[in-house]
Image (cartoon, rainbow, N blue to C red):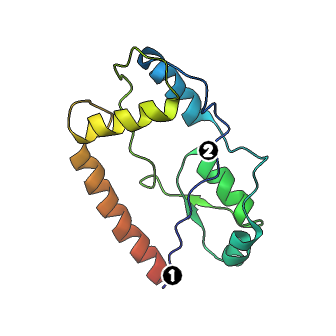
Amino acid sequence: MTISLVRHGRPAADLVTRIAGRDFAGWLDAYDAAGIDRSLPPPASLREVLSGVAPLFCSPTLRAVESANLLAAGLTPTPLPAAREVPLPRQVFCPLRVPPVWLTVLARILWNCRFARAAETPAAATHRARALTAELIHLARDH
């Protein structure tokens, strides 16, 4: 039984333009809608490791599906709805204009400390992760 977890490629989203907290929700929308940056293909060594791997499962996000398609040419990835990132809080108070990555870190810290709300609570995210783990183990045993 083998399970290989691979993170998606670099998103084709603006990760450097500084934004204030009030602009974070709009940035998140653009980030979530972004595919992958095609100018940075996956390393050949990773493609070799995953060649012939079937079936192939991925997150339902566009960038994960695109990454899976690049890694395993000829295979159609099956998105697993539970295999998605935990949503970030959409509102972060930060009057300074900072790189969006800083706001994502701040949002995640606030969410973990229960100071900010997102579409999913930490308890719900933990429950989903446990269910996904069981599903992946089941799928690995079946294949």
Instruction: State which tag comes first along the sequence, 1 or 2.
Output: 1
Residue placed at 57% from the left, 33% from the top?
A: 31
Q: Quadrant of residue 91?
A: top left
Under mark 2, the amino acid is Leu
> Can the viewer see residue 32?
yes
In-front residue for pair 72/81: 72
Instruction: Tell me residue 126's x, y (percent).
Output: 27, 54
Name the residue carrying label 2: 62
Figure check: 112 above or below 142: above
Instruction: Tell me residue 119's x, y (percent).
Output: 33, 34
Q: Determine the CA span between mark 1 and mark 2.
A: 25 Å
Name the disc covering residue 2, or none: 1
Mark 2 burial class by Cα count in 10 Å: few <14, some 14-19, many 20+: some
Instruction: Tell me residue 4's x, y (percent).
Output: 53, 72
Figure check: 95 above or below 140: above
Residue placed at 58% from the left, 60% from the top?
A: 78
Residue placed at 34% from the left, 39% from the top?
A: 108
Under mark 1, the amino acid is Thr
Q: Quadrant of residue 82?
A: bottom left
